[in-house]
Image (cartoon, helix red, strand yellow):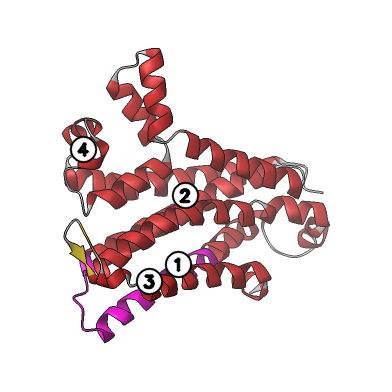
Amino acid sequence: MESLRSRWFLVYTGIFGGIIVLLFVFGITESRIMGFTGLSRLLITYIQLAMAILPIFVLITTVRSVAGDREAGVFEYMLSLPISLAAWFWGKLLGRFVVVFLPVFLAMLLAVAWGLIRQAEVPWGMFAYYTALLLVLAWCFLGIGMLVSSLARSADVAQGAAFVVWLTLILFLDLILLGVLIRESLSPEVAVAIALANPLQVFRTAAMILFDPQLVMLGPTAFIILDFFGHAGYMAWALVYPLLLGTLTAAFGYTLFRRSDLP
């Protein structure tokens, strides 16, 4: 409820709602790319934009959860109530997840409603998979954000660390890895393994695989990925890995939070 009343939630909701509205205004549903038209084209564009906005927004707003409360002296009041540390930490994480994921999902529902009004064919399979991708992406970065927040001693330090984490993940996308491969003569398998440890890269490739099943846009890297995972295997990996990563980082953050000097 505290998050729903905050200004950042209104801004966050306005951003994703505004993206859908702008895509309608610019006629994305009327254009064609690689044979995709209508709602499929809109969802492809929306998922790419969400990949750029959602992680940094989740990190910046989440890292203040623990560090901000510690700095504001909330823990002294919290410890005087019959609330366990586990209930407070995981309740805060789950509440934040609902607040973060809700506007993203509502924007996708708005797109589907628009498609039904326009009597366009709704790609329910793509809609379901993209929804699941956004869900695990939000959970992954929420877990990372809670870990950073548990490590930082102040809200300012936490926000700076969150930006560094996001920037590092951005830097280790395809172009940087290609440079490392060329300079250090790494084997392609090692470079691809490093790339797929990056949740942003996993999300980006999974979003691509629905409209490019052979991953032609990735070049020779696609052969390594598809030979190892297969098409269905990689789609499953893209859902399981971010979910596990978010859960493990959140659990590690809780362990540090429980052992730390809260006051």
Of marks 1 and 2, the one in the foreground: 1
Secondary structure category for the residue under label 1: helix
Residue in view at x 25 percent, y 41 percent: 217
Category of crowding for the residue at label 2, using alpha-carbon neighbours closer than 10 angstroms: few (below 14), some (14–19), many (at least 20): many
Disc 1 vs disc 2: Cβ atoms closer than 8 Å? no
Left or right, residue 68 beside residue 236: right
Secondary structure category for the residue under label 2: helix
Of marks 4 and 1, the one in the foreground: 1
Q: Which residue is mark 1?
A: 104
Q: Is residue 101 magenta?
A: yes
Q: Using the image as rendered, state which of residue 61 and residue 97 is in the foreground.
A: 61
Mark number, residue 140: 2
Q: In whole angstroms, how far apart are the C-alphas of marks 4 and 3?
A: 37 Å
Q: Which residue is mark 4?
A: 229
Q: Which residues are magenta?
A: 98-125
Disc 4 vs disc 3: Cβ atoms closer than 8 Å? no
